Image: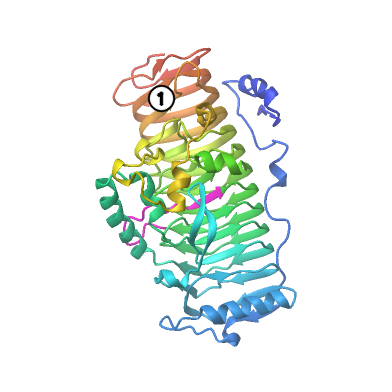
Amino acid sequence: MKHVCKAVVLSFLSAVIFSGCSSEKKCDYTSLPWVDQVGAHAYPGDELFKANDYGAVNDSTILSTAAIQAAIDACHQKGGGTVAFEPGAYLTGALFVRSGVNLQIGEGVTLLASTNIDHYPESMTRIAGIEMVWPSAVLNILDAENAAISGSGSIDCRGEVFWDKYWTMRKEYEQRKLRWIVDYDCKRVRGILISNSKDVTLRDFTLMRTGFWGVQVLFSNHCTIDGLAINNNIGGHGPSTDGIDIDSSSYILIENCDVDCNDDNICLKAGRDADGLRVNRPTEYVVVRNCIARKGAGLITCGSETSGGIRHILGHNLKAYGTSSVIRLKSAMTRGGTVEHIYMMDVEAEGTRHVLSADLNWNPSYSYSELPAEYEGQELPPHWKVMLTRVEPEELGYPRFKDVFLCNIKATGVKEFVSAAGWDEALRLENFELSNLDISCVNAGKVIFTERFKLDNVTLDVSSGDKILFRDNTNMISNVHYKSNDLH
C-alpha cells in the first residue's frame, strides 16, 4: 500500500513532514491543500476576429504590427473573443493582448519578431530582479484579465541579434570590471510578458529563439502555461534565454511543457537585493508537472532573485535531459528572502550536472555590485544606482533555504549527485529531506553547514568510488547505500 505524506503548508508542522516518509514507502506531495487552486479560472470566448481583415499580411517582408493590434483592440472593445490568422508568416513588433482576447496562432501560422529594437516601446517593468525601463516583449499581456495566447503555430523571436549584442558587451564590460551591470545595460527583447494580470492562459504553441527570457509572469496570479515547446538553442548560444520565469506571482500552473534553453528552464524569482526587498512580493503556490527540461541550467530553479521569498512550490512527473540541475536553489548574501516549502517528486533525469544544487553565494561576479573607482563622482544611470543601493542592516540580505523535500528520483549519467552548502554555523540549510533516490553519478558531492539534512533510502552508484563529503552538519541523518563499492 502506498503511504501518503500528507503535508500542510503551515511552517510549524514542517518537522512532521520531515519525518513522515518511510524509506520503504512512496511519498506523495500532490495532496497539499493549495494544489487544486492553481491556474487560470477563465478563458476567452470563440467569437472570431481575423487579423487579415484588419490588414495583416502573411508576407514576412511586410510589418503587420499595426494591423494585428487593430484586430486585438477591436476584439477587446466588442466584448472579447478570438483573433486568428490565415496560414503564413507575419512580421511584427510588440503586440499587446487585451482582456477577453485569445490571440490564436494556429497551425501553419508563424509570427516573426522584428529584429529592430525600436519596434518594442520601452516602459517600466522588472528585469532580473529590479524595476527599470526596458523594451516590451514580442507579445505582452499587461493589466489584463481573462486573456490567452494559444494555437499550434509558432513565434520565432529571432533573437540572435540580441545574443551577439550581449556577448560583445559582456567582453567589454568584464574588462572594465562591470560584469555586475552588463545584463541590465544590454537591453534585449523578451518573448512573452504577462504583467499585473490574472486568469491568463498560454497554450500549445512553439516559442523559439527569444532575445532574452522566454516567458515572464510578473506580479500576476492564476495563470496557466500548458503545452508550450520552448527552443532557445536554435542557431547559437543565447545568453539569459530562460524558458519560463515566474516572478513575484502566485497560483501558477505549468504543465506539459518542453523547454530547451541556455539558462534556467523553469525559474522562480522574487526580486533582487534592496529593490526586491522594497517591493517584497513572493512567488508562491506554483505547480510544475508533466514537463521536460533539455539543455539549460535547471529543471526547476529558485533564485537567484529571492528577496520577496519563494514558497509552496510543487514539481512532479518531470524529466530532465542534459539539464544542469534537477533542482537548483541559488541566491546571494545581499539578496535576502526565504526559499521554503519546495516539493519535488517522481523525476527521471539523464546527463545532468547535479540532482540537487543549493548555493547561498551564487556567482559572485554577477551577484555583487561594486562601482570601479574611475566612475566615482560621475552621474550614473538610474538602474546603476538601484543596483548599488546597499541592503541595511546587512543581515537583511542573508537568504535562507529551508523545508525542501525531494522524493522518488531516478537519475543516470550525473556528474555530481549533490552540492549543498550553507554559509556558516549561523546560516545553514535547514530541514532538507531526500528520499527514495536511485542515482548513477561520477562524483557523490558535498553537504556542508546544514541543520536536519536527511538522506533516506538513497542509492548511489558512484563511478569515481568516492562518498558524499559531510562537514559541519547538525542533526544529520544519512541512509545511503553506495552501490559501486558496497559501502554504507
Q: Nearer the viewer, residue 222 or 488?
A: 222
Q: Main secondary structure of the magenta part?
A: loop
Tell me if residue 240 can be seen. Answer: no
Q: Nearer the viewer, residue 359 or 232?
A: 359
Q: Quadrant of residue 311?
A: top right
Residue sitting farthest toward the front: 377
Residue stretch in magenta = 232-246
Residue sitting farthest toward the left: 175
Label 1 Cα neighbours within 10 Å, binned few <14 / some 14-19 / many ≥20: many
Q: Nearer the viewer, residue 289 or 419?
A: 419
Residue at image location 53% in from the left, 73% down from the top: 107
Mark count: 1
Measuring from the top left, give residue 222's x and y in whole percent.
Answer: 68, 52
Apparent side of residue 151 relative to residue 488 in the rendered image (left or right): right
Residue at image location 59% in from the left, 31% down from the top: 340
Question: Which quarter of the figure is the N terminus placed in?
Answer: top right
Residue at image location 50% in from the left, 35% down from the top: 335
Query: Under tag 1, what secondary structure?
Result: strand
Magenta span includes 240: yes
Magenta span includes 414: no
Q: Which residue is mark 1?
A: 460
Measuring from the top left, give residue 189's x and y in whole percent.
Answer: 44, 62
Q: Quick check: 16 above or below 318?
A: above
Tell me if residue 275 can be seen. Answer: yes
Question: Which quarter of the figure is the C terminus placed in?
Answer: top left
* Residue type marked 1: Leu
Measuring from the top left, give residue 325's x and y in whole percent.
Answer: 42, 38
Residue at image location 34% in from the left, 22% down from the top: 484
Please say which color scheme the image uses: rainbow
Q: Quick check: 190 above or below 461?
A: below
